[in-house]
């Protein structure tokens, strides 16, 4: 492990050969701009890893990656990698069933719900749920950002759907109160996105609806306790709080599955997947294995209640830096729906944003560029993200604002 080692000369300058001189190193990286004077505690991470603020795929717990490294070559003396193992083998069956039971424990999932591990990411769920449950009727969609919009577009290819809320007029910086919404009396289901990853707006409580409630929890599942019984269907892409991309976890009420049409393509049929314990075809074994390691790691660290406290701590550090910057940084989301997973903020100009991102990179703060629809920066700080990374970023934000404000 190496920390920040500024060069002895202190100043970066042009050498006689007119090459830019390095200011020092962070891990293996050569720093070509002066390092801002920020709190440098714990800037160096195991294996020279950066603070990865990417929106997903994103940081996984180091101990999980270490276990995966071992499982990659010879899993528990089976003589083979989890990636090389038959999905019908005893060893894999155990991995598969433990992943399910650990997730059930973490989220306290009632026994009348199925837990499915499906391929196609969260995006395929946009289509699959509409194919199964619109059934010639219509559904209500609550649009608080880009992903809700995509879910609605997919549903409209399958049938009829109504936008009962859309925060487009304020560039998706707010969420509604469910009690104020005008639900359609005959809606087959109500769909919403608990955390909009791009805009950084999040629902803080589990709503209740008369029609079956469906939720895309891709970017905040396992970050807080959830009242599962309020929902008929929850789905989440794995690549934020669970594991590798391409896998979606679906938590679905058995009585809802029973209402799905009989003749669907097998791979798009919840009933087929449920009846076969997510082993209808070859499942994404490696991805499920990694999710299982993440679940065990979370259980060993106090579960979702403990995760929630740390999420609040991480995001609190960054929102404080925004609020105490005298308007230099502006948070995108309204205060009551600020996401604990994706902190979105802008700077006074595009030039300053570019400068901020460049300097951040020198501090090993990676992946902070915001989505073009919001601009500015986005710090994605999921469960596995080290708190120290938020301390360094908050400290850098203060230093940057005082130097450039
Ligand atoms: N919903 C949300 C809230 C997301 O953040 C994402 C991905 N960023 C998706 C859906 C789509 O997920 P996938 O790429 O797994 O299809």
Image (cartoon, helix red, strand yellow):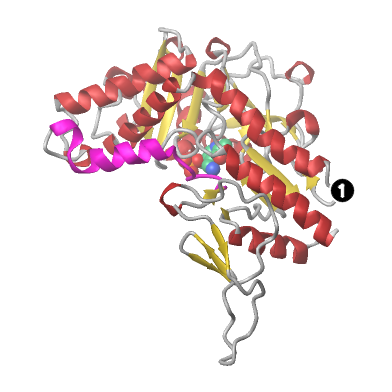
Residue under the point 54% across and 39% down: 386
Q: Position of residue 80 (x, y in %)?
A: 14, 39
**Which picture quadrant has residue 394?**
top right
- Answer above or below: position of 348 versus 294: below
Residue under the point 46% across and 17% down: 106
- Residue 291 part of the magenta segment: no
- Answer above or below: position of 376 versus 60: below
**Which is nearer the eye, 202 or 105?**
105
Q: Secondary structure at mark 1?
A: loop
Decide if residue 37 is in sight here. yes
Q: Is residue 356 left or right of residue 256?
A: right
Start and end of the magenta stretch?
A: 53-77
Q: Residue furthest right?
A: 326
> Mark 1 highlights which residue?
327
Q: Position of residue 321 (x, y in %)?
A: 76, 43
The rendered magenta stretch, by its main secondary structure, is classed as helix
């Amino acid at each position: 492990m190496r920390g920040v080692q500024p060069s002895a000369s202190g100043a970066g300058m042009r050498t006689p050969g007119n090459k830019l001189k390095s200011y020092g190193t962070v891990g293996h990286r050569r720093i070509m701009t002066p390092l801002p004077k920020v709190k440098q505690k714990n800037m160096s991470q195991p294996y020279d890893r950066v603070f990865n603020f990417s929106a997903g795929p994103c940081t996984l717990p180091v101990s999980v990656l270490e276990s995966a490294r071992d499982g990659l070559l010879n899993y528990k003396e089976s003589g083979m990698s989890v990636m090389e193992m038959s999905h019908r083998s005893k060893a894999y069956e155990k991995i598969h069933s433990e992943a399910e039971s650990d997730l059930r424990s973490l989220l306290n999932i009632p026994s009348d719900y199925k837990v499915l591990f499906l391929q196609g990411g969260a995006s395929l769920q946009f289509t699959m749920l509409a194919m199964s449950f619109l059934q010639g009727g219509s559904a209500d969609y609550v649009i608080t950002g880009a992903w809700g919009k995509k879910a609605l577009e997919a549903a409209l290819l399958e049938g009829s759907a109504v936008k009962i809320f859309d925060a487009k007029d304020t560039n998706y910086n707010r969420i509604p109160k469910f009690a104020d919404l005008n639900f359609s009396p005959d809606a087959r289901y109500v769909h919403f996105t608990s955390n909009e990853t791009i805009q950084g707006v999040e629902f803080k409580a589990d709503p209740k609806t008369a029609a079956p409630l469906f939720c895309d929890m891709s970017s905040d599942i396992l970050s807080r306790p959830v009242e599962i019984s309020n929902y008929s269907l929850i789905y989440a892409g794995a690549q934020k709080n669970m594991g590798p991309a391409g896998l979606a976890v679906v938590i679905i009420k058995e009585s809802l599955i029973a209402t799905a049409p009989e003749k669907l393509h097998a791979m798009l049929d919840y009933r087929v997947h449920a009846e076969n314990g997510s082993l209808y075809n070859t499942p994404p074994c490696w991805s499920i294995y990694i999710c299982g390691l993440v679940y065990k790691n979370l259980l060993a660290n106090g579960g979702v209640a403990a995760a929630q406290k740390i999420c609040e701590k991480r995001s609190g550090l960054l929102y404080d830096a925004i609020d105490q910057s005298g308007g230099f940084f502006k948070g995108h989301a309204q205060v009551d729906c600020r996401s604990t997973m994706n902190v979105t903020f802008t700077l006074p100009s595009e030039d300053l944003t570019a400068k901020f991102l460049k300097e951040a990179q020198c501090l090993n703060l990676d992946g902070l560029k915001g989505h073009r629809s919001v601009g500015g920066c986005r710090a994605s700080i999921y469960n596995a993200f080290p708190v120290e990374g938020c301390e360094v970023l908050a400290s850098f934000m203060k230093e940057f604002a005082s130097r450039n404000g």
